[in-house]
Image (cartoon, rainbow, N blue to C red):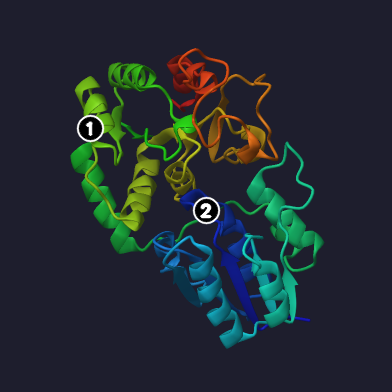
Amino acid sequence: MTPRTIVVVDTMGGLGDLVLSLPVLEGLARSHPAARLTVVTTAPWHELLLRDPRIAEVVPVPGKDEATIVGVATGVLERIRPDLAITTNRQFGLPVLLQRTARRAVTDLWRRPPADELVDLRYLRLLVADGVVAARFADLPPRLVLGPDELDEAAELLGRLAAGPPVLLFPDSGMPVKRWPVPSWRALVGELRRRGATPVVVAEDAALRDVLVEAGAVPSPSLPLRALAALCAAAAPRHGAAVGGDTGPVRVATAAGLPAVGLYGATLALRYGLREGLGTNVQGWAACPERRPTAITEQACWWTGTCPFTRDGTPRCMAEIRPEQVLAALRP
């Protein structure tokens, strides 16, 4: 059966989760170019998809609670009754909902995950195995679609911010276990300055931003999500790069075409890292006995941010990543 209507429900909730689903969306669109593709995903991250010609309709989910997710997904699925429905989220009875309302449903993209296969590649390869994505699209990278007007505005802004090759720094993280220590960030800023690059700090945490500005970084203004993606895209042709932890903004950077250095501690880069050719992964304390690549939420440090292997609880894995390693990973 060739589907005429496809619905993808991606409501894992994080910005990075949406970027991980981008290859799925492109694989479906390219495998079924005549089908009408609808995406249900978390607001405000849905804004990244709004100008994508591959997607006919983007439906935002204005919350991460069960009632909101199920309510929005139910409305879309019952309205469209799609030929094919796919979800990355197995919570809240979504698999049963998809199976009830779609002619065909793929509801488990997390089955039997190996520890050394990247999540977004795993998604694609399972869909190829299920016969809903063509085999020639099994290795698609994440890709954002930005307009020429957005890119022009970003290039103008970047011209005001950076004299040398721009290195966008993303020190923020919503999870303490993913944060690189501030002294390491300060050391990196200083060395980038000495090498003629312009470190541009992009951070919502004002105190953290101010610390890096004092060390020599240039502060980026607060930007809407699409403008941030465009800033990343504008930095690429200027021999730019991005640096940050296992966070959504770093994934956005690579999907916009900007090479990145990803700093990985509690998460294993072999599973959650950046694609080869899009970024370089630096793994901290690879031998950590607590790390569980296929069950990260069960790690003792995951929700508390407290490391069981340090006296003060700061993540040993992140502290062991040295600025010299990051500098070596950045392209000249």
Residue hosting label 2: 19
Foreground residue among 114 and 302:
302
Above/below status of 262 relative to 45: above
Q: Is residue 173 visible?
A: yes
| Side of 288 relative to 304 (left or right) | right
The amino acid at mark 1 is Val
Identify the residue at image location x=42%, y=45%: 249
Above/below status of 10 relative to 193: below
Residue 145 image offset from top left, x and y in percent = 45, 61
Label 1 neighbourhood size at 10 Å, few (<14), some (14-19), many (20+)?
many
* Count of residue discs: 2
Above/below status of 306 relative to 44: above
Q: Is residue 135 visible?
A: no
Residue hosting label 1: 218
Could you tell me if the residues under marks 1 and 2 are in contact, i.e. CB atoms within 8 Å? no
Image quarter (top left, top right, bottom left or bottom right) of the C terminus: top left
Residue 96 image offset from top left, x and y in percent = 71, 72
Identify the residue at image location x=47%, y=33%: 245
Foreground residue among 293 and 262:
293
Identify the residue at image location x=77%, y=61%: 128
Tell me the distance, in whole angstroms, between the alpha carbons under discs 1 and 2: 27 Å
Identify the residue at image location x=77%, y=53%: 111
Residue 141 disc label: none
Residue 45 image offset from top left, x and y in percent = 43, 59
